[in-house]
Amino acid sequence: MGGLSRFKAALYNRPSMTRYQELADDIEASIKAGILQPDEKLPSVRHTSARRGISASTVFQAYYLLEARGLVRARERSGYFVVRQPRSSPPQPTAASTPEDRRFAVVDVSERVFEVLESAMDRELVPLGSAFPSPQLFPLQRLGQCLAKAARHIDPRSTFDDLTPGSAALRRQIARRYLADGLALSPADLLITNGALEALNLSLAAVTRPGGAVLIESPCFYGALQALERMGLSAIEVPTHPGEGMDLAALEAAIVRHRPQALWLMTSFQNPLGSLMPVARKKALVELVTRHELPLIEDDVYGELYFGDQRPPPAKAFDTQGWVLHCSSFSKCLAPGWRIGWVAAGRFARAVARHKLTSTLATNAPVQLALADYLESGGLDKHLRRLRQALLQQRDQMLAAIARYFPAGTQATRPEGGYFAWLQLPGNCNTQHLYRQALEHRISLAPGAVFSASPGFEHCLRLNFGHPFTPALDEALARLGQLATQAAA
Ligand SMILES: Cc1ncc(COP(=O)(O)O)c(C=O)c1O
């Protein structure tokens, strides 16, 4: 094993870390299966530690993690108890979304998406369909100061120095963050882009040729569908589980059957499902693509918005052969609108750099410097802690409102990060109709049909919980629930 992979293995396979996560996952599964009932006491730390042959502190760590997930609560001098969540969460969808992989020429997706994007940008609407969290949640003043400083002090020569691959100072700061989270990327592995979307598009251009096929999730981020459409690629949709992400058996079958040129997916807090692929599955995914020599374009824009106690490792963390093109940005966690993203493209780095140089040449230099300055001066972790806390609270408030107002039989995901919940409505509810009705009531939403090139998600919708839960938001959810109830009747 090389130095880098040993480093990664050491960080991701620390025995105490996997043990407490395993214990937390086992207990969570028991709670979800109803084996441990609401208000029931968890086995004592001493008992669990003896039964499992692990230390008391490992057990405590697991219980803290379950507390962070909102599943248990400590009662003073009594121990840990399962939290009762009677009406606070609708049931979660369990089935994988589509029965088998399907191949589609992507056409006409953009029209549908443009319409939804337009409505999501209308300030007069309640932004349940928006792709962005509330601007109130970001340190805009501090960022503004960094931008003013960068504009004042920018060295004119840096316009040339910071051409692709981008500002060395910023790449160093991003690499440092990855390192702190256990992913050993060097600044030289990174290329700065105009948001994650450019990183994803450059990656796609680097590994495909028009007419080829690309594997995507079902349902998937509509940006992926638009990119395939624009580049004349066909989409093969692979079933993706609302809880655990892409079905790897179906993925392997699709690789063998369709001989795709690339795979594009999200391993953490997938848009629109909110799913989080377990670590073991991420490892298996990377092994699979490496075995088949298939480029994996990983979109990790929500990776920093986790509600657990640490950032889930991306698939890139297990990539020893360079088949993963890892893309992310600051758009969702720090500086929306600043359009700063990046890609660590592994063995495709040169091809990606060439596409960048021949398409947009470089990324806005003052903005890169301002971000590097912000990161260097500290404060990001504090901001992120607050942001995650706000999102978690808003998630619970929204799920409680859905349980209150939506028709019986509604299922909703309960994501462990990000700010999207995915709903499946009962009966013959058509969310495209619901979308139009909701607009009349000044409410936006993202109907299921924009997340797939194929039929199958007409009864689904994505709601954004990235905005403070105001009375107006509660009222909008009540109205939406009412409309859905009428449609389901
Ligand atoms: C899943 C996903 N990937 C990528 C992007 C694009 O990110 P950026 O704004 O950094 O280009 C978005 C934005 O909505 C997104 O939701």
Image (cartoon, grey):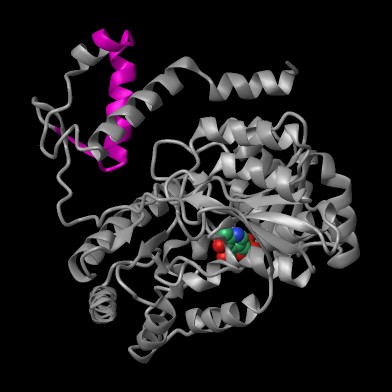
Specify the quarter for ligand 1.
Answer: bottom right
Residue 65 inside the magenta-drawn segment: yes
Q: In the image, is residue 339 part of the stretch drawn in magenta?
A: no
Image: 453 above or below 182: below
User: Magenta region: which residues?
Assistant: 50-74
> What residue sits 83% from the left and 64% below the top?
211
- Is 202 rendered above or below residue 28? below
From the top left corner, tell me how far across and down residue 165 is, in percent: 82, 51
The image quadrant of residue 70 is top left
Q: Nearer the viewer, residue 390 or 440?
A: 440
Q: Which residue sits at x=43%, y=68%?
A: 134
Residue 157 visible somewhere in the drawing? no
- Displayed quadrant of residue 36: top left
Q: Which image quadrant: the C terminus?
A: bottom left
Give percent across and percent down for residue 383: 45, 51
Q: Quadrant of the N terminus?
A: top right
